[in-house]
Amino acid sequence: MSKLVKFHILFLHLVSSVLLLSCKEKAAETPEKYELVWADEFDYKGKPDSTKWGYEYGFIRNAEKQYYTDDLKNARVEDGHLIIEARREKIANEKYKSDEFEKKNWLKYIAEIDTAQYTSASLTTRGLAEWTYGKIEVSAKLPRGVGQWPAIWMLGANWKEAGWPKCGEIDIMEHVGFDKDSVFGTIHTEAYNHMKGTQKGKKIVISEPYDTFHVFALEWTPEKMDFLLDGVVYNHIENEHKTADEWPFDQDFHLKLNIAIGGGLGGKHGIDDSVFPQQMVVDYVRVYQLKKQ
């Protein structure tokens, strides 16, 4: 290889590094009216930071088919990104024949499954970081394929006491694999939820969700919620100032990142086993709150 060719290769490498750095710096700029209060840039390697993230374990909700674990195969940080990976693999159900679930009709199915056919991860800030109001911003690429159900969402801190949907749920981003190239932003409350068909949500078409990072965000104040895709508002929800049944959002919420497989919504058209493994790749998670005047 000639010295001239080597020089050009080195020059291009330096230019690309500078461009990538400048893009990262630009992305990290704090919006003018906000201050950064919590973030994970995933600039480390191995398990997700245990001071910021916890895990959900086993079968959890919605008759989904995945078994959540804390295994590195399912949740890890590498190359500056959080990887949540759904896999087609068998794992024993620790809650099989458990009295804990056999006594609850709506969760009875958990105790009836001896072996799961899929594994995945669900990370949560519950008990570690929760917020009332602010801007939550996540840059991510999504898994593809029928049966995949990735989500970036929030749940009210009082969920154990109040129950769902009274505690409130905010789906910052929800995608179902059978509805390609689209994402949803939705709230669920006692008054507005999918069981009644009254949930408040909107869908937006998204370009290259599987190969390109997109920024999914929520701007949340006492008066409203705005759901954004790459900086553009596509769903605006006003506080009607009625009761907590309509607006349970004046309290702390924690954040969840997960890939579900199948289930009530994700499994409407079955599961394509040929696509596994699939990943949700997260570049960063940032939480801002309004600057105090």
Image: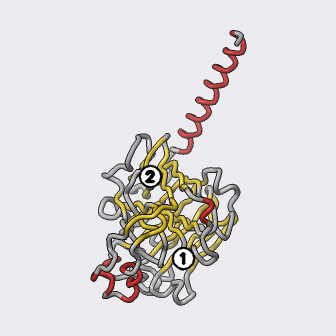
Instruction: Specify the quadrant that holds the C terminus.
Output: bottom left
Front residue of 148/240: it is 148
Q: Amino acid at mark 1?
A: Glu
Front residue of 113/28: it is 113
Instruction: Specify the quadrant that holds the N terminus.
Output: top right
Lower position in the chain sequence, tag 2 or tag 1:
2
| Residue tagged 2 | 73
Q: Amino acid at mark 2?
A: Lys
Taking the spot 43% from the left edge, 82% from the top edge, the residue there is 165
Corner quadrant of residue 253: bottom left
Query: Vertically, is 226 above or below 30?
Result: below
In the picture, measured across the screen, residue 255 lies left or right of residue 216, that is left
Question: x and y percent of residue 241 in the render?
Answer: 47, 83
Q: Residues within 10 Å of mark 2 (few under 14, many from 20)?
A: some
Question: x and y percent of residue 103 in the render?
Answer: 31, 88
Taking the spot 43% from the left edge, 86% from the top edge, the residue there is 245
Q: Which one is in front in this view, the residue at disc 2 or the one at disc 1?
A: 2
Taking the spot 65% from the left edge, 71% from the top edge, the residue there is 203
Spatial CA distance of label 2 from label 1 is: 41 Å
